[in-house]
Image (cartoon, coloured by chain):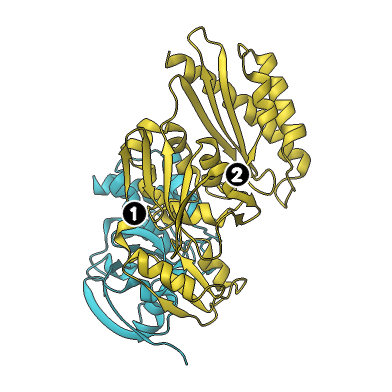
Chain colours: A yellow, B cyan
Amino acid sequence: MKPAPFEYYAPDTLEQAVELFSQYNGEAKILAGGQSLVPAMNFRVVQPSVLIDLNRIGKLSYIHEEGDVIRVGSMARERHLEFDSSIEKRTPLLHEAVPFIAHPQIRNRGTVGGSIVNADPAAELPVLMLALDARLKAKSVSRERWIAAKDFFVGMFTTALEPDEILVEIELPFMPARTGWSFMEVAPRAGDYAMMGVAALVTLDESGKCTGVRLVYLNAGEGPIDAKEAAKLLEGENLSDKVIEEAAMMASEKEINPFGNMHASVDFQRHLAKVLTQKTLRLATQRAGELQ
Amino acid sequence: MTQSISVTVTVNEKEYTRAVEPRMLLSDFLRHELGLTGTHVGCEHGVCGACTILFDGESARSCLMFAVQADGHNITTVEGLAKDKDNLHPLQQSFWEAHGLQCGYCTPGILMTMIPFLKQNPDPTEEEIRHALSGNLCRCTGYQHIVDAVKLAAEKMK
């Protein structure tokens, strides 16, 4: 239960960090909050020969509004996100979901960028990035580029980042007008990995008709699962219990692909997805209505 | 060759400097280098909460940090709560009075979790206390008395 030896660097600037990461390409791991990497190193599941710690780079921890987006530095702590007033006002879905991430002791250290890059299919932040249409800024020695969340999560613990790229910023568009939200998950105990979780966004027009839906699931496949067919069933409709149930059936039976684990069989995960879809859609619809 | 890095850290208001390997966990540093064995080591993968300390005033798992990361930072361990054994912190006193521990293994981590919790939430409901305790495992399963002790502490600390 002790990590294997490694060489340690704690650069003061991002430029030094990308330089080092390029120099030790393939051997080095980036240390952000360490709340997933360090356990894996303690188990020796991961044995990087070089560790590049970003914690000394103070400039990567910001959260601020700019125009109609919120910019979040990749080293902002999850706890910081939880109490940020812009996040609460502009992306209430994220504000509602962050307290479900592990425990305060973990959120005090865990970073937004770290959780996104780790791309654990059972994690909350990848699901939220997809639901909120975030854009993610990657940096290497030679270039910077933006990647849409829908292109970023490419598989289990796998992202579109090139081996020499570091995630430096997350751009969150403000949630659209007349959009209600809801995040729910079911875990054996508070703070544990959820057996199933859903982020829902519902946009209504002035007459109360649904014009847009996002339904994104965690622990439901190889990455965050965007249930687009279920969303299509709801668009253009008045969201009655009947259409909501049809969408929940579509998402839980056809679109997600859960694997089951020691806490929940595949059937139980699908059952949870169905129930949570109905609950989150109803709450999101109600909230959207209150915003009219 | 193994790298050795100098770390200067303030623990319980006292400054220490040691040279350590980068792979040394902060929990092991506190226990083996500084002799502060009040911080307990349970699972070493961030699940049990026994090694919880305050890092710059906020609760954190010391088994999920490397000692080199603590350079220049401020740490409080359970040893920093009371002046001496006759002057316990009100939270410790409440654990004593309400029998909030059996074997005591999880206790330091629970205390270091409840300190910032009670600061942020001085008048918690039982549900909030249970939620706040969810990141700390007690394998004696004496949770009821732990909850009672935290309630008592909230009263005392008002």
Q: Chain of mark 1?
A: A
**Residue that label 1 marks:** A61
The N terminus of chain A: image quadrant:
bottom right
As drawn, the residue found furthest toward the top would be: A207
Which one is in front, A62 or A42? Answer: A62
Residue B75 in the image: state x and y as whole percent.
Answer: 30, 68
**Residue that label 2 marks:** A187
Q: In the image, which disc is placed on residue A190?
A: none
As drawn, the residue found furthest toward the bottom would be: B1
Residue occupying the point 77% across, 43% down: A266
Residue A276 in the image: state x and y as whole percent.
Answer: 63, 31
* Residue B49 visible in the displayed image: yes
Circle 1 sits in a helix, a strand or a loop, which is it?
loop
Q: Amino acid at mark 2?
A: Ala
Residue A264 location, quadrant: top right
Task: Specify whether A253 is left or right of B117.
Answer: right
For marks 1 and 2 on the same chain, the one whose residue lies earlier in the sequence = 1
Residue occupying the point 64% across, 19% down: A234
Q: Chain of mark 2?
A: A
